[in-house]
Image (spheres, rainbow, N blue to C red):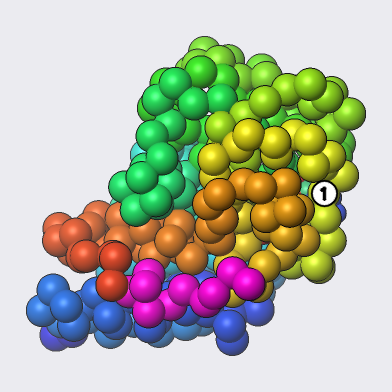
Amino acid sequence: MTDKYAVIGNPIGHTKSPMIHGSFAQATGQDIDYSAIEGSLERFADDVHAFRKAGGRGMNVTAPFKLQAYALATERLERAELAGATNALKFEGDRILADNFDGLGLTNDIQRNLGFPLEGARMLVLGAGGAVRGALQPFLAQQPAVVVLANRTQAKAVDLAKQFAGHGRVQGCGYGDLAGERFDIVINGTSASLRAELPPLSAQALQGAKLAYELAYGKGLTPFLRLAQNAGVPKLADGVGMLVEQAAEAFLWWRGVRPDTRSLIGRMAIPLV
Ligand code: NDP
């Protein structure tokens, strides 16, 4: 019988996950069926259990269910535990295993695909929401010189930095504290670009940076990327590579085979102009 997988989120109409996993399955010769489920906050647990009972083997979880999926799991892997959220579930009998591949996908994209080592890098990360929380441990594991978290609500960045202080050098601050600081890599982990907004970042904080990375994808040149371009940052990237890389890690976890990601990222990327 064909193994079933799905992505659950709301809204879900825009999801690229069925296409990505379908492409992985074809390339690796795996026989899977991958669908999209529009979930609701009230029915989330029922939807997951119904999918399991119908033969589901695993699920990707996207907004706004990453915390509920974490709560529903019977076992959480370390990355999910540290992120306090999950973006992938695996079903084994009565067990619901939870992992989180968002941060690993982002790290893989920056290092392997874009060729920017994090070791020794001075990193500025904007935002202190779910995606940034999930990325912190994978970042710090690469031993950057420092990760500075800047958030509109400063206290959230400071708290997050405190929670991860045991994993490496990480500091939380507000945007106003960045004056005079220089960074190698600047990552926009806020959701501002989804509304075509710009975080209150001064162009000066981008001076000398080698890479500006936007977590949002499919938006072209966002206000953040435009600011970086005008500041002379030589390499701009959006989150399409992160999306494909986290999917590849989930596929590996479920199927034991790691698909190639480069050609798919190339096909999905839209020009940042
Ligand atoms: P959250 O809602 O958890 O966090 C949002 C963050 O953005 C908060 O820190 C918030 O600050 C900040 N923010 C929102 N609007 C503004 C603004 N106008 N100016 C400054 N800061 C702002 O979102 P997520 O962490 O889940 O998602 C963040 C981004 O990452 C989104 O663009 C999402 O699409 C993208 N993403 C991409 C993935 C991929 O695979 N490429 C995977 C997951 C997420 P405050 O605390 O002050 O409210």
Q: Which residue is mark 1?
A: 199
**Mark 1 Cβ inside 8 Å of ligand 1:** yes
- Residue 233, percent from left and from top: 62, 47
Can you see residue 45? yes
Whether residue 150 sits left or right of residue 102 in the image: it is: right
Can you see residue 69? no
Determine the secondary structure under disc 1: loop
Residue drawn at 43 percent across, 77 percent down: 268
Residue 12 on the magenta span:
no
For the residue pair 180 and 265, the one nearer the viewer reads as 180
For the residue pair 48 and 13, the one nearer the viewer reads as 13
**Number of numbered callouts drawn:** 1
Residue drawn at 75 percent across, 34 percent down: 205
Residue drawn at 73 percent across, 22 percent down: 181
Quarter placement of the N terminus: bottom left
For the residue pair 36 and 106, the one nearer the viewer reads as 106
What are the residue bounds of the magenta stretch?
A: 264-273
- In the depicted structure, whether residue 164 falls above or below residue 80: above
Q: In this view, which residue lies farthest toward the left? A: 29
